[in-house]
Amino acid sequence: MRVLILGGDGYLGWPTAMHFSALGHEVLVVDNYLRRRIAKKTHSEPLIEGGDLATRTALYENVLGTHIDWLELDLADPESMFHAVKTQRPHAIIHYAEQPSAPFSMMEFDAARLTLNNNLNVTFNLIWAVLQECRDAHIIKLGTMGEYGTPNVDIEEGWIEIEHKGRRDKFLFPRQAGSLYHTTKVLDTDLLWFYVRTYGLQVTDLMQGPVYGLSTDQADKDHGLAPNFHYDDIFGTVVNRFIVQAVASVPLTVYGKGGQTRGYLNLKDTLQCVHLATQHLPGTGQMRILNQITETFSVCEIAERVKSVGNAMGLNVDIKSIPNPRKEAEMHYYNPSYSGLKEMGLQPHYMTDEVLAEMLEAVLRHRNRIDREKIMPRVQWS
Ligand SMILES: NC(=O)c1ccc[n+]([C@@H]2O[C@H](COP(=O)([O-])OP(=O)(O)OC[C@H]3O[C@@H](n4cnc5c(N)ncnc54)[C@H](O)[C@@H]3O)[C@@H](O)[C@H]2O)c1
């Protein structure tokens, strides 16, 4: 397969590029280093960061012997997007290229405007590049479980049948996001669904939960191939943040009551899910939505797990509730369906004590680089 990976310098994009290349596919990654620039501007540089794409792809070729092509382009610019799509003539396009930080999107006007314009323009340009250059290509779009919010009813996999005044129809499951970033994902979904039902594109929209981990088969071969690993309040996801806090002896920052429950998955499973999506085409004119998580936890449950594994390793881990900077339910019902990817063959890597211990060990090797100034939340929702 020829695969185009948009956002291929990112936490998920780079491991995905290596994964597909190692499986023998022709891979082109595109990125404009937006995340690296925002990280620098907001003092949120990661604990672990590989070189730029020139450096990483050269190292990858040296270590694994296969080649990954790359381009530095701003995909929010239509000409750049068209150029990327024409260059690769892809069978599958994996779209990660968005501003993914909820706190950044809530920081101030310029950050909000950047998030809205960047995310929607990349998706819109991609749709039109596919329509005009490679109509049969399969778009695999990374959405988020955060699109659904935390409704007081079970969350279905993308769609819901509704009976109203004696008649039935199927609709997108209601969405109510908790940040502007998550709202851009809702808008992406709507935009894709419009073009799918009107122009017959084929799209898989993956509602992914927060990802954790830094180990993959290829990344483990050389420390220079590691994914960027954030622990700050802007780009860090909760499990990765707690692991670093545990190593730095900073009490784990539970926001408010800590009953916020979400679906999580291991980085290795993101790679599996995206690959499974490429192997199972939704079909022309189909928008397939899959909930990409493997298990659910509350924030308190994750904190307790990290504390117990950290203390068993001789660390001094404590947990502290701090005022919640976000507007969100701290105790709520949460029951999402997520059988679709398992039915396609996903073999989950669960958050076991061994997995948490391996993450703690990996972070311990970089403990002298931890900057405690980056740990506490710096952005309030209002
Ligand atoms: N990491 C998670 O836990 C998680 C969970 C759910 C959904 N997602 C989604 O998965 C995708 C990837 O997430 P990630 O954690 O790897 O984020 P990331 O910020 O590490 O990667 C995104 C990449 O896209 C690039 N990018 C953004 N705008 C671009 C543009 N206009 N042109 C070219 N490149 C651009 C960035 O520079 C970055 O390298 C995002 O869309 C995110 O919303 C991530």
Image (spheres, rainbow, N blue to C red):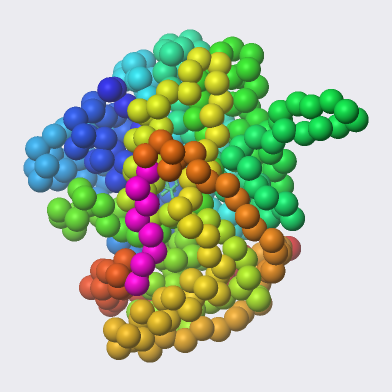
Where, quadrant-wise, is the C terminus in this rendering?
bottom right
The picture quadrant for ligand 1 comes to: top left
**Position of residue 358 measured from the top left corner of the image (x, y, whole percent):** 27, 69
Q: Is residue 9 visible?
A: no
The image quadrant of residue 7 is: top left
Residue drawn at x 45%, y 53% as measured from the top left? 294
| Most foreground residue, 36 or 230 | 230
**Position of residue 351 measured from the top left corner of the image (x, y, whole percent):** 39, 64
Q: Is residue 138 left or right of residue 47?
A: right
Q: Is residue 175 visible?
A: yes
65 vs 179: above or below: above
Residue drawn at x 38%, y 73% as measured from the top left? 244
135 vs 110: above or below: above
148 vs 87: above or below: below
Residue drawn at x 53%, y 56% as measured from the top left? 263
**Position of residue 81 measured from the top left corner of the image (x, y, whole percent):** 44, 24
